[in-house]
Image (spheres, helix red, strand yellow):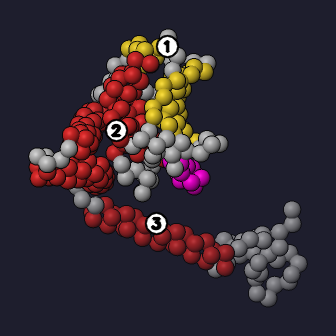
Amino acid sequence: MTYLPLFWETGSSSVGAKPFLGQSTGIGFGWNHPLWFSLLTALFAGLLVWFVIKKKYRHQQRQKPAVNPEAEARILQQQKLILELQLHNDQLKISKENLHLSISEKDRFISILIHDLRSPLRYLYKNTAYLFRNWKRDSHAELDDLITEINNSTQQIHFLTEEMTYWIAAQDHTYRIRLKEYSLLAIANELEDLYIENILQQGNTLQLDIPVLMKINTDKVVLKTILRNLLDTANKNTDDGIIIIQARQAYQKVIITVLNNGVGVSPTLLQDINHYFSTSEAMPGLNTQFGHEIIRDFARLLKATVLYETPENGGLSVSLTLPH
């Protein structure tokens, strides 16, 4: 390797010249080289950054509060209380909504009850007032008609209060129906005995088309209540006509149908009625009678379905399909 001298003696020839003692005899860089300055600058900057970061970290450590177990326990307890308060608040909102719903249902029930009681009470008041004034001078035939109307009015009130009692009991989730095998014709005969005066007063005729040996496993009180309301509705909407209660068995079902040749209903109302009985929705203007509530709720207790139809010859047909 060949070395070139950096410093030479003054005045000497280039040939054979020797470098001064302590001077570099090869290519390199001295302390005044620019690279040394760059290295020192970078090192200084690194030290400065490290110093700043360390100072900042120590400051944060001094600012950080000391760990206090009691304070942490209080914080956890407060957080737990906040969660419990939020839960109670949500429960109160649900309770408030349920309360509003309950009040609304009670108001609607009272409205329905007053509507159903108004008619028989009005007839009862009017007829008893007339009887009080004229019972001495009226003929036996007139008195007989008047007493029949009074009997029908009191009978309707009696049926309504009994059905209301059963219906209120059925609203309890613990209520259980009592299934037993009964003769369907015997149940229909009992209904005829109870309601024949009302039917005759409207000028109607009741026909029973039920096989003598037909049995049904059901809750007698619940089924009789449904059929009585269907019979009452048919009688109210029929004058000098025919009402038929018929029954037939289809597969594992028993279908009981109450027909009449009265005024019937429009196709639109028929659709609304079937929608009402197939859902839990309220139908303003439709369920203004307590009988509608009774039929729908009691049919569901028996796992039965209700279907309204318009026969070809007019009138109305209501079918109650029950499990056999």
What SS does tag 1 mark?
A: loop
| Outermost residue, right side | 15
Q: Is residue 4 left or right of residue 155?
A: right
| Local crowd size for mark 1, using a 10 Å CA cut-off: few (<14), some (14–19), many (≥20) | few
In the image, residue 66 sits, relative to residue 43, either above or below, namely above
Q: Residue at x 81, y 84 (%)?
A: 12
Residue range of the region highlighted in magenta in the rendering: 264-274
Q: Is residue 31 left or right of residue 236?
A: right
List the residue tagged with mark 3: 50
Residue 216, image x, y percentages = 46, 17
- In the rendered image, which quarter contains the N terminus? bottom right
Q: Residue at x 21, y 40 (%)?
A: 140
Identify residue type, mark 2: Asn
Identify residue type, mark 3: Trp
Q: Earlier in the sequence, mark 2 or mark 1?
A: 2
Q: Is there any visible trace of residue 96 in the rendered image?
A: no
Q: Nearer the viewer, residue 40 or 109?
A: 109
Q: Nearer the viewer, residue 270 or 277?
A: 270
Residue 211, image x, y percentages = 52, 16
| Outermost residue, bottom side | 11
Q: Earlier in the sequence, mark 1 or mark 3?
A: 3
Magenta span contains residue 203: no
List the residue tagged with mark 2: 198
What SS does tag 3 mark?
A: helix
Instruction: Please identify the dominant SS of the magenta region.
Output: helix
List the residue tagged with mark 1: 212
| Local crowd size for mark 2, using a 10 Å CA cut-off: few (<14), some (14–19), many (≥20) | many
